[in-house]
Image: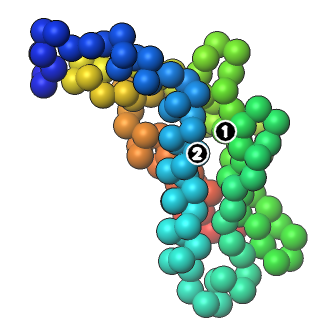
Amino acid sequence: MNGTTENFDWVTARNECSIRNVFETLRLQIENDIKIMNESLLLNQKKRYSYGIAAAVGGFTVFLEGVAGSRHSVLFSITEKGSILVRTEEGEPVLEGKPTVCDDGKCRLKIEGRERELWHVRKMALEDLFFHTY
């Protein structure tokens, strides 16, 4: 059974893998990603822009803000269907995933039929914001 036992407590595991718990874990991990990105900026870059996170209606926004007022962002929210939705600042969907306990007993997000670790979800959602040249 891929590392789980016959007596695996899937009910408790799934309860711990609730949409609220996964969303909060994702937010905390993204805060750390933002800290790493800001610390990795060169001095001349730090003078021009920085990354941040802010509460938004129904979720939070991760943004890149420049001194000239330019701003790019990605919005994370929980849908009524119980999934996590990530959209661009224009409202275009980037990804949508539902929490699930996988065969190995780990909590992941199921996106387009594939079970993804949270680091991979963060990469899918933020890679363009963090590494795009504006």
Answer above or below: position of 33 versus 18: below
Residue 107 place in picture, x, y as percent: 37, 27
Vertical placement of residue 82 versus 53, above or below: above
Question: In the image shown, does 83 or 71 lie closer to the viewer?
Answer: 83
- Amino acid type indicated by mark 2: Arg
State the residue lying farthest toward the bottom. 43
Q: Residue at x 66, y 83 (%)?
A: 46
Residue name at image x 71 percent, y 43 percent: 60
Residue 129 image position (x, y, % from top left):
62, 57
* Residue at which label 2 appears: 27
Instruction: Give the answer, above or below, for where 54 lies relative to 118.
Output: below
Q: CA distance from mark 2 to mark 1?
A: 9 Å
Q: How many marks?
A: 2
Question: Which-is-in-front pick, marks 2 and 1?
Answer: 2
Colour scheme employed for the rendering of this structure: rainbow
Give left or right: position of 134 versus 111.
right
